[in-house]
Image (spheres, grey):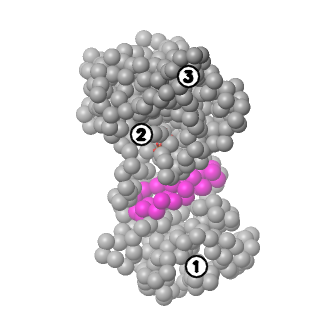
Amino acid sequence: MILILDFGSQYTQLIARRIREEKVYCEIHPGDKSVDFLGEFKNLKGIILSGGYGSVYSKRAIWPDSKIWKLNVPILGICYGMQLIAQYLGGKVVSSKNREFGIASVNLSCDSLLFDGINSKEIFWMSHEDRLLKMPKNFKVIARSENTPYAAIEHVSKKIYGVQFHPEVKHSVSGKLMLQNFIFKICDSKRDWIIKTYIVDEIKKIKKQVGKSKVLCALSGGVDSSVAAVMLYKAIGKQLICIYVDHGLQKFGETERVRKVFGKLFGKNLIVIDAKKLFLSKLKGITDPEQKRKIIGHMFIEVFDKEAKKLKGIDFLLQGTIYSDIIESVSIRDTKSFIKSHHNVGGLPEKMKMKLIEPLKFLFKDEVRILGIELKIPNEIINRQPFPGPGFAVRVIGEITEEKLNILKKADNIVTEEVNKAGLYDKIWQAFAIILSVKTVGVMGDSRTYEYVIVIRAVNSEDAMTANWVKLPYELLDKMSSRIVNEVKGVNRIVYDISNKPPATIEWE
Ligand code: XMP
């Protein structure tokens, strides 16, 4: 394993991605976490100290556990991570008047193993204000740029490296090769992280942990909870009970789809609760997006809790938490600004006093999909585009009424059908419909109409942090538009959303 200590950089997740892409197992932990837990990992091969937003010379600087220097494994510090190494080992870091941000041409010393096979002049991504003024003892410079005389440093005998630039960012052309050099040539890692071994190991672990107890699962029909449920089923069979709450805010035909796919496997252990009326009544008159999200979150817990209480002998709760969900919460990034309160089933465990099982918590989305394929979960579940926890509630702008919800479900279904027919479903991150709260004037036949507006939104993204609107072919948009107007009563106008994220978000609420 490679341990990544997170000091708050927005790129920390990317470091983990790059390493997993090389089939090497890695975990991200808060930068100041005690490393005693590493006793469980006999195979620690190296440590990466991520970038961060603070200054290593400030009183509030976050420092790694000092034991890391004695673990005798290679260390790579990136940006803030390099400054930590330098400051800790006797160098000096100072604030610089000029912030260096963007691509920079860097001259590399090719005799360093870190830059093995990389051209002596390369482009790397820089993003820093502080800079190294004095080298720590026993270090040498292995890279320079015009603005940064100490762009990378290396200990003369120990395997400790620091780079001021960000190799994990795509703009750093040889960043991938540099990280490969670190994990394979310097840390001597092996490409042995494969899903099949993961399944076998996890199933063994779960069986031992659960024993004869029962496990409860909130199944949503989305990729993560479906994969988690099937994985648990493989491990403990009928000891798993799944509850699916039909709150009426899901896609067209979702409940039937869940029954079809999971009913066969779980039999009577799949409990479907019809809570459509209840959710609609609680959302009546609510227009504020955050209030909607909160009500849905609370209602979900209430309904789930009530059902769970009827069941006996349940000690565990299964959650389909994936790595990107937890990185956000374990991270020391307390300054991350709040945008939307994401609702998954995050509030459940605290209230329900059950022990948690999270078999996917160290997997990225694409790894969860590979796992799902290995577990033979149908394609229609595995390759679904992301769908928000609060469902259509955040795509019905303004008050959620049964009428608007029904219109939206039909329109959205047409968008999905047409994207599928055009062979674009797997090529687009998300394509969906939104219904606005305004009505506009139109004309149909010889009569005036006054009806709802449907928005079509299609975006591409790598990680949902940023997104670009997709230039869908005009013919496809035309087809969607005429089908929606002809097939869905109550709509007379269709518009296409051409905003990127940022400044817009993917969902409208
Ligand atoms: P935004 O709208 O923040 O969405 O650009 C980014 C991605 O997250 C999805 N999304 C959610 N997913 N619970 C989820 O599980 C939520 O509450 C939620 N809100 C947004 C959204 O569909 C997009 O893929």
372 to 6, vertically: above or below: above
Residue at horizontal 66%, vertical 42%?
471
Around disc 1, counting alpha carbons within 10 Å, would you say few (fewer than 14), some (14 to 19), or many (20 or more)?
many
- CA gap, disc 1 and disc 2: 43 Å
394 to 167, vertically: above or below: above
> Residue 443, labelled with which disc?
3
Q: Nearer the viewer, mark 3 or mark 2?
A: 3
The answer to whether the beta carbon of the residue marked 3 is less than 8 Å from any atom of ligand 1 is: no
Residue at horizontal 39%, vertical 41%?
342
Name which quarter of the figure residue 391 lies in.
Answer: top left
Q: Amino acid at mark 3?
A: Val
Q: Is residue 279 magenta?
A: no
Residue 256 in view (yes/no): yes
Where does the image place residue 318, in percent across and percent down from the top left? 40, 31
Name which quarter of the figure residue 298 lies in.
Answer: top left
Magenta-drawn segment: 6-31
In the image, taking residue 389 as reference, residue 485 lies left or right, namely right
For the C terminus, which image quadrant? top left
Q: Which of the marked residues, 3 or 2, is nearer the chain's N terminus?
A: 3
Where does the image place residue 377, in percent across and percent down from the top left? 58, 25
Quick one: SS at disc 2?
loop
Residue that carries the numbered disc 2 in the rendered image: 509
Where does the image place residue 410, in percent across and percent down from the top left? 53, 20
440 to 86, vertically: above or below: above
In the image, taking residue 479 as reference, residue 95 lies left or right, namely left
Q: Amino acid at mark 2?
A: Glu
Residue at horizontal 30%, vertical 75%?
59
Residue that carries the numbered disc 1 in the rendered image: 151
